[in-house]
Amino acid sequence: MSSIIAIEAQNRTANGTGGARATRREGLVPGVVYGNKQENQYISMDPRAISKELYKPGFFSRLFALVVDGKTQHVLAKDIQLHPVTDAPMHIDFLRVAKDAKIHVNIPVHIINDDKAPGVKKGGIVNIVHHTLEVICPADSIPSEITIDLAGLEAGHAVHLTDIKLPKGVSAAHPDRDNTLVSIVAPGGGVKDGAEESAE
């Protein structure tokens, strides 16, 4: 599970387009915190605090402890606007969540031991069907990644959602839609589905 990182911000009284521009002129990034049946809170942040976390894996699936003028609340980053030329953060939205709430998040899929898969050794190609998996989990227990081990997988076969063990308390949001996660495409193409495997 990911550790909860604390990031600091300040309240800002000026909101709207004019207020956001004024905040940027001060060298800060404007933002808003919403959700959890509370009023929107308008904030400003040091751009370095955002950039430090933005390029780490799973930015949008990590719970943050947002400290605003000394008061802490748990949030998820939901949207960020970047400058079209410099990629500097220009505005950020945070969703306020209760620690015991169950939330929907997209978790990165991490492939291991693909070099040990017999199918790859025979010339097959790893086909990642889903690079992320949408799951439902407690806000304070968000997995950092979903690991899929390809050791032993033959060409023409796939790893399905039912083949992996999700962390405790975590379930797939769309198990039918996201059933096939990774496959090894045989050199001649094609992946065996469940019916073909049963016939064999």
Image (cartoon, rainbow, N blue to C red):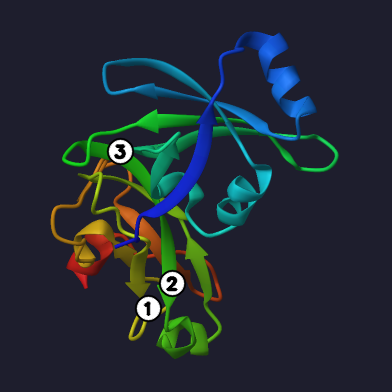
Q: Residue at x 31, y 58 (%)?
A: 143
The residue at the point 41 percent across, 61 percent down is 109
Please report whichever mark, 1 or 3, sits nearer to the chain's N-terminal start. Answer: 3
3D distance between C-alphas at marks 1 and 3: 26 Å
Pointer 1 with pointer 2, Cβ within 8 A: yes
Q: Nearer the viewer, residue 92 or 21?
A: 21
Specify the quadrant that holds the N terminus. bottom left
Q: Which residue is mark 3?
A: 104
Residue 86 percent across, percent down from the top left? 83, 43
Residue 28 in the image, given as x and y percentages of width and height: 69, 34
Q: Amino acid at mark 1?
A: Leu
Q: Earlier in the sequence, mark 3 or mark 2?
A: 3
Which residue shows up at 19% across the image and 52% down it? 170
Residue 9 is left or right of residue 27, and the answer is left
- Percent coordinates x, y for residue 185 in the rendering: 49, 69
Q: Is residue 161 left or right of residue 12?
A: left
Which of the pair 113/79 is nearer the observer?
79
Q: Nearer the viewer, residue 141 or 28?
A: 28
Please tell me in which quadrant of the rendered image residue 73 appears: top left
Question: 160 above or below 48?
Answer: below
Dot 1: few (<14), some (14–19), or many (≥20) neighbours within 10 Å?
many
Q: Is residue 130 visible?
A: no
Counting other residues with Cα less than 10 Å from the Cα at mark 3, is it few (<14), some (14-19), or many (20 or more)?
Answer: some
Q: Which residue is identified by label 2?
A: 111
**Left or right position of 141 against 96:** left
Image mark count = 3
